[in-house]
Amino acid sequence: MRLERILLVNPPLSLTQVYGKYASGAPILPPLGFCYIAGVLLEQGFDVRLLDCAAERSDLAAVERAIRDFKPQMLGVTSTTVSFHCAKEVIALAKDVDPAIVTVLGGAHVSAVPRQTLEELAALDVGVYGEGELTIGELTRALAEGRSFDAILGICYRDGGRVRLNPPRPNAPDLDRFRVPARHLLKDLRLYSPNPLRGFSRSVSLISSRGCTFDCSYCDQSVFSRRWRGHSAGYVIEEIRALKNEWGFDFFSFEDDHFLINHARVAELCRRMIDEKLDIGWTCSARANSFTPELAALMKEAGCKIVFLGLESGSPRILQQIDKDITLAAAARGVELLAAQGILTYGAFMIGTPGETEVDTALTLEFALSLPLDAVSCFVYVPYPGTPLRELALKSGFVSDDWRDYSAHPTRLPFINAGASEERVLEQQREFYRRFYLRPSHIVRHLPNYLNRAFLPKAASMLWNFSLNHLGFRRAVSVRPFVAGEAAGGQRARAHT
Ligand code: B12
């Protein structure tokens, strides 16, 4: 076929759909994986357009306009499980507008359940599962040359009336071979909001490594597997330098699952940031027991301001059940060590896991209150497909088969333990936030951050929403509508590490 124009669409998913009533403090980040894919396609010489509906606040009508104006021969869509229902709409729409468009879906959801995804979505021609760069290159070449797809690793596709699942593609051993993501295709990098701290003006996200070697059973590693690969320090420094010099970014958010897997690499990166006087701020996610005092001190000197820690639970029994491979004492030591260095800590917790009792949940709140954490998230457990813990969830209670229930802060829980009540779990979540954030000591300590001029409007909106959610006004007021053109973002909220 003649393959010249490729439209890439990140589906229209609003922050409210992802974060429910906690949307006002939630971040919008660039779809980096998609930008890597776009980079490969540009390098191959295709005319590529990228529509990030989530950030641009575009709806299906905008997707339809883009298809009619640009007339792509291929539509690429990215999706997690949370955005899968929107991806379905985009793909079905594209086929309605032009049945000849080849539709391709990549990302976390199709990577976890490739065959099921094609079976659920008749308008989808090809699912790319796992790392996408090499696969999309081969797929486009096969399409352009009219070759069959049967030798392309890492895809699931329709062959006549049958769905075929080809074997997985091994991850590329050398990450540095990939070009930096084609962020320039995004409409406006200012639409994205990893929040800069006081003293910084513009922030941006980047990935310095892929995969994680730990076995946390709630975590979906379908894309990159439980193997780890890192970019070299030189590659990362060059990416930072370009983002700083060409775009003016001064705050960098490393979105790696676990930034500290290879200490030598992090130490080299930090030393180069210091020696080359990059003068930047940055943040990363890591396991709480992965720091040494020396490394934390070096990170601080290199500009590290916040570390996100997936602490998950205060119940030793639950920690063991989710294969977190950490003790409470070790987790606490990590938080204290970072706090002693003056690095802010953000702890992500999770409640409502399979078999969890009220005592376990109470232990989690107590643990959070006992630590010198600067901010927290309390997520309700979601049984993402492809995760080992989902198997236990299926045996322990109700598991929703409607993907629309799978969001960061669901209002209709996708998993409820047998005998537990949805209302009670959500009440425990509200209590968690109330007890953590309304402590006078916490408010006093963080007052200077809330008085930061750049953060003030956001803090006001978060405070307003917090009052609605936690002081009982919510029933009188509907959830904030999704307003086109509205600026969004704020403090980070996630539970990956
Ligand atoms: C950064 C991040 C975020 C950011 C922003 C995400 C974004 N805009 O991309 C924030 C903090 C906002 C976020 C929010 C959430 N996240 Co998140 N996030 C991540 C994280 C840590 C990195 C994403 C990334 O940039 N990866 C690097 C790139 C290179 O990988 P990639 O995006 O997967 O893309 C590759 C392939 O998937 C493929 N590909 C992707 N799209 C396409 C499209 C085509 C056409 C093709 C051919 C290929 C292709 O090729 C790419 C290059 O190899 C991942 C974990 C991870 N390591 O990926 C979790 C992850 C994606 N998040 C996850 C979750 C659960 C969430 C939340 C629900 C979490 C929460 N509790 O808050 C929300 C929902 C957000 C949403 N809109 O769906 C899960 C998804 C699981 C699932 N089955 O859906 C992951 C996998 C974490 C985990 N291990 O469980 N997240």
Image: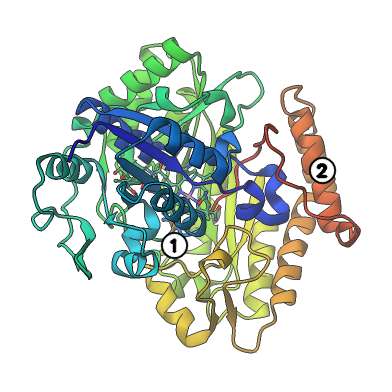
The front one of 378 and 2 is 2
Q: Is mark 1 within 8 Å of ligand 1?
A: no
The picture quadrant where one finds residue 461 is top right
Q: Is residue 284 left or right of residue 193?
A: left
Q: Is residue 236 left or right of residue 165?
A: right
Q: Give the residue at the far bottom of this rendering.
A: 419
The front one of 349 and 402 is 402
Q: Residue at x 32, y 58 (%)?
A: 111
Q: Position of residue 61 (x, y in %)?
A: 56, 42
The front one of 90 and 210 is 90
Q: Secondary structure at mark 1?
A: loop
Q: Position of residue 58 (x, y in %)?
A: 58, 38
The picture quadrant where one finds residue 184 is top left
Viewer-side label of 2, 1: 2
Q: Position of residue 190 (x, y in %)?
A: 57, 24
Callout 2 amino acid: Leu
Image quadrant occupied by the N terminus? top left
Q: Which residue is under mark 2?
A: 463
The picture quadrant where one finds residue 415 is bottom right
Q: Position of residue 193 (x, y in %)?
A: 59, 32
Q: Determine whether 94 is above or below 483 in the image.
A: below
Q: Which residue is under mark 1?
A: 326
Report, in whole angstroms, how far the alpha carbon at label 2 lies from the one at label 1.
34 Å
Q: Secondary structure at mark 2?
A: helix
Callout 1 amino acid: Ile
Q: Residue at x 37, y 72 (%)?
A: 388
Mark 2 or mark 1: whose residue is earlier in sequence: 1
Q: Is residue 92 left or right of residue 194?
A: left
Q: Residue at x 59, y 51 (%)?
A: 347
Q: How is the image coloured?
A: rainbow
